[in-house]
Image (cartoon, rainbow, N blue to C red):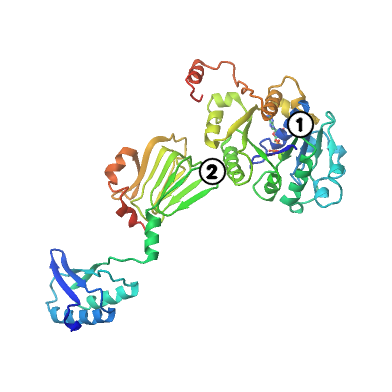
């Protein structure tokens, strides 16, 4: 029996789809059986980021409406046999699926997979409710921008009302030089406001965009910093204690001293 | 005979008159006797100063209507004005309201963006109030964490109410009908501070938590919170 993780954020364009694609790929790299579900109906793009758009025959609305079996709608990844995608519908409307409908599919898939990773649409309405139904865990993605953190906070508040484990946080698109110059919120500040556990930080990396355009998630690349970050998130999900990547090389004496005294740095 | 017993006792005090009304007889008979008594005694010149009257009801409960009737009878006598009416008894309803208004409600959580916590009486938040979150109380608001959202104390109009926080960096503070907002650019927060309304200035001030003891010495007292409602 696997577990279902929903990737959500409130705000659009912060990296939910990117995180879903890369987390799925990174888990598959660890030989886990993974199924990705795109619940962004009407605005599907997980298939594009995964490079699988040309293989779609049925979609999630077909499954909910009983026009096909769940298995028939699943697409196998180009790179891994253990990685599958249930695409969203492009021509239908969000209202065609219900939280119950999605939950039934997630529960069915949990029998066969180690991890179900659910890509959530932006917003807090129907689409969000659909995506969260059936999830056991949640990952909240934010960027180091005030508006994004605000929306993440809103989503965390809503997730706390669900029967879901306390969500984990991914801070995406970090730009080191802007944090240093104080133009961007820093990681500590964000974690202090949101007060949930941090499961990963991902820098802003051109390789992510290249990967998305070529349909090959950056997690496949051995050396890019973003790739390592996504693979580390996967390892933490699998229960490994992987320290956070250093944003810059010199950690500073103060940080070490603080750690020595068991203070939060 | 019963009729010989005084239903109304009038006492003069430094502050005016106190009327002690018998609490066993019927209300109409009180009114009647009051009218009678006042018409005997109430003969005075027009230019005398007003005399303030306190009415002691003992163990009698009066509805608002009955109080109005009582006041009306006294008002007819031109030099008398009812200052207040005291009774030993209150209704269940009033007692419940008192209880609500004097209670302190603890909330143990992070109040997140989009969430509103609203209570009667005092609110004690054990956790942070994040930007976009809102905490509202008819009494005081105490935040044992970081206040970064909106706090409204005394939302029924009690301008004596205060907002105190371990870390104060609110988007907006409201006390009674007073509002103050954070500065538009990069305001740093302050630790252990308390906001209150300075009566003379008609606006919200923030001061060290220690100072509030001087500004609101009766902050924790039962009586103050009892009169919230
Ligand atoms: N770490 C990153 N570095 C660079 N670009 C990124 C990163 N994460 C996401 N992006 C880009 O940001 C855009 C929005 O990401 P996406 O995952 O589609 O967001 P969402 O699904 O939350 O709307 C995409 O163009 C994506 O390639
Ligand atoms: Mg998306």
Give B57 or A247, whichever is nearer the viewer: B57
- x, y percent for residue A197: 58, 32
Tag 2 residue = B112
Is residue B202 left or right of B33 when viewed as pictured?
Answer: right
The image position of residue B159, as x and y in percent, is 35, 52
Q: Which of labels 1 and 2 is toward the front?
A: 2
How far apart marks 1 and 2 lie (CA) works out to: 33 Å
Q: Quadrant of the N terminus of chain A?
A: top right
- At numbered mark 2, what does the secondary structure look like: helix, strand or loop? loop
Spot the residue most to the front. Answer: B1
Quadrant position of residue B226: bottom left
Left or right of A20 in this view: A242: left
Left or right of A132 on screen, residue A85:
right
The quadrant holding residue A219 is top right
**Res A80 visible:** yes
Chain letter of disc 2 in the image: B
The image position of residue A104, as x and y in percent, is 76, 48
In the picture provided, is B185 more to the left or to the right than A233?
left
- The answer as to whether callout 1 falls within 8 Å of ligand 1 is yes
Q: Examine the rendering and report whether any part of residue A142 can be seen.
A: no
Residue at numbered disc 1: A212
Q: Secondary structure at mark 1?
A: helix
Q: Using the image, name the chain to which the residue with label 1 belongs.
A: A
């Amino acid at each position: 029996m696997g577990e279902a993780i929903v990737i959500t954020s409130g705000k659009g364009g912060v990296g939910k789809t990117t995180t879903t694609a890369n987390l799925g790929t990174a888990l598959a790299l660890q030989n886990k059986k993974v199924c990705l579900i795109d619940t962004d109906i009407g605005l599907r793009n997980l298939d594009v980021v995964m490079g699988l758009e040309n293989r779609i025959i049925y979609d999630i609305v077909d499954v909910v409406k009983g026009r096909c079996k769940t298995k028939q709608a699943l697409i196998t990844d180009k790179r891994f046999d253990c990685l599958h995608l249930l695409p969203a519908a492009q021509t239908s409307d969000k209202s065609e699926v219900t939280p119950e409908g999605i939950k039934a599919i997630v529960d069915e898939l949990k029998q066969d997979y180690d991890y179900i990773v659910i890509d959530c649409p932006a917003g807090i309405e129907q689409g969000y409710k659909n995506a969260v139904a059936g999830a056991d865990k949640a990952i909240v993605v934010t960027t180091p921008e005030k508006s994004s953190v605000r929306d993440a906070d809103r989503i965390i508040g809503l997730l706390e009302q669900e029967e879901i484990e306390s969500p984990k946080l991914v801070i995406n698109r970090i730009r080191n030089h802007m944090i240093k110059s104080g133009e961007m919120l820093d990681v500590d500040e964000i974690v202090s406001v949101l007060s949930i556990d941090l499961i990963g930080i991902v820098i802003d990396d051109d390789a992510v965009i290249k990967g998305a355009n070529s349909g090959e998630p950056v997690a496949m690349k051995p050396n890019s910093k973003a790739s390592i970050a996504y693979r580390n998130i996967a390892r933490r999900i699998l229960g490994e204690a992987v320290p956070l990547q250093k944003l810059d090389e010199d950690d500073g004496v103060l940080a070490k001293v603080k750690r020595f005294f068991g203070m939060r740095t | 005979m019963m009729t010989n017993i005084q239903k109304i006792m009038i006492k003069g005090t430094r502050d005016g008159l106190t009327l002690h009304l018998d609490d066993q007889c019927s209300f109409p008979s009180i009114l009647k006797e009051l009218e009678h008594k006042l018409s005997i005694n109430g003969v005075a010149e027009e230019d005398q100063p007003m005399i303030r009257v306190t009415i002691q009801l003992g163990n009698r409960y009066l509805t608002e209507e009955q109080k109005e009737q009582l006041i009306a009878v006294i008002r007819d006598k031109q030099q008398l004005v009812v200052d207040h009416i005291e009774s030993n008894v209150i209704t269940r309803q009033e007692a419940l309201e008192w209880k609500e208004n004097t209670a302190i409600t603890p909330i143990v959580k992070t109040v997140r963006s989009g969430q509103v916590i609203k209570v009667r009486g005092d609110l004690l938040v054990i956790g942070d109030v994040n930007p976009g979150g809102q905490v509202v109380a008819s009494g005081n608001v105490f935040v044992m964490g970081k206040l970064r959202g909106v706090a409204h104390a005394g939302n029924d109009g009690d301008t004596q109410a205060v907002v105190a926080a371990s870390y104060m960096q609110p988007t907006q503070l409201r006390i009674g009908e007073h509002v103050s907002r954070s500065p538009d650019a990069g305001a740093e927060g302050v630790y252990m501070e308390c906001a209150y309304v300075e009566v003379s200035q008609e606006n919200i001030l923030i001061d060290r938590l220690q100072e509030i003891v001087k500004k609101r010495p009766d902050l924790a007292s039962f009586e103050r919170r009892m009169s919230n409602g």
